[in-house]
Image (tube, helix red, strand yellow):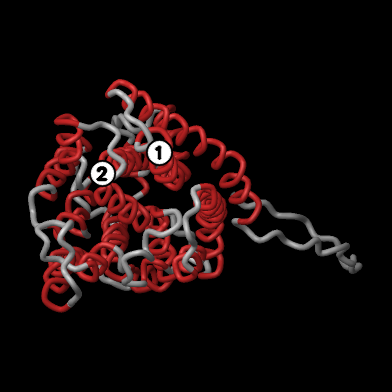
Amino acid sequence: MPTTHIHPYATRLPSLTGLRFVAALLVFAFHATWRSNYITGSTGDALGKVFANAGSYGVTFFFVLSGFVLTWSARPNDTAPRVWRRRIVKIFPNHLVTFAMAAVLMLVTAQPFVQLDTFAGLFLVQAWIPDMTVPTAMNPVSWSLSCELFFYLCFPALLWALKRVPVRALWALAGALAALTLLAPVAAQHLVGGVPLPPIADGTLSFEQIWFVYFLPPVRALEFVLGMVAARLMYEGVWPRLRLLPALLIAVGGYAINSSVPYLYGTGSTAALWLTPLVAAAAGADQHGTASPFRGRTLLRLGELSFAFYLVHGLVITYAHTWFVASGHPSPAARGGILLAVFAVSLLLAHLLFTLIESPAVRRFSTARLRHPGPVPVVPGPRKTLEVKE
């Protein structure tokens, strides 16, 4: 990266941290207006349509962001085990706590445990299994961690390969990845079978076809690798200087497009086409020190909580709806109040999870502690003058 382009923000990319919470809010909005619809009537129907693709859009942002940030912050001469250690320490403590929360809530509500669902969720392999109940069992949102874990395991090899791609070929690689995101739904329609599910889309799609596009880690890896390529393009100084506002407009326009195209295109990797420019533009704003609304102290703090918020919010939405909405007939105003309380509780639990679990675990276990080498024997020898070189 040319030294003249580096700004102090570039090492931290705070705008991307702030955007993480915006993406988490999209996922929250989807879950709050989908099955657990807190707002009913014509307003609820309208919100349901507006946020129908918000969940998949937010998840795609996280996948692109992961590839970008890991590539941007890759350490020279790092080893694969060190990379894996840092990433596993980042995701597993929060995952295990929220998995236990889900288990307790299932016990309280007398829900049965299915062995395959439980162990697949515990070890984060659920996204690999094309069974309708498995990917979203226990804590449903953790299926995306199953994909992230696959990305992290592949990252050292992917980064090694990406570094060997000539700069002049990077745009061709990005184009190929973009084309594959468009071909994935075509492959699902023509190569994947299964029994159609009437409640989904127009009733012609099977769960296996949806699973191929939405859950299967190698397919979702297209977004992760596209983020990696965007980071490499920026590192080499060949990414176009796209401002944050035009990138936001592209992302909003892309959301409108994804909301109107056929289901498999709107719910899968094609969102990366509209979100990758936003990720790169936000990083560019930090790199060059230009204005960014996502760099404020409050949004930055919320961004730090976003991973924990993402993992807890689905459980709070689901069980609060079961206990306080579905069991009675609250008024529209009460429903709105309950939804605000759900958001507040999710944020509070995220704060506790980040403060008590995530942050201490990362500090303690992300790097190996060196054993004390003991006293070093002094070997007599001739005196030498210490030379200091600047």
Q: Quadrant of residue 48?
A: top left
What label sits on residue 239 in the rendered view?
none
Q: Is residue 286 visible?
A: no
Q: Residue at x 28, y 45 (%)?
A: 35
Relative to 112, 55 lies left or right: left
* Residue at the spot of label 2: 34
**Above or below, 348 relative to 70:** above
Q: Amino acid at mark 2?
A: Trp
Relative to 117, 231 lies left or right: left
Q: Amino acid at mark 1?
A: Pro
Relative to 261, 110 lies left or right: right
Observer-nearest residue: 348 or 252? 348
x, y (%) of residue 51? Answer: 21, 41
* Residue at the spot of label 1: 14
Q: Residue at x 67, y 51 (%)?
A: 388
**Above or below, 281 relative to 131:** above
Q: Residues within 10 Å of mark 2 (few under 14, many from 20)?
A: some
Q: Residues within 10 Å of mark 1 (few under 14, many from 20)?
A: many
Q: CA distance from mark 1 to mark 2?
A: 31 Å
Element under label 1?
A: helix
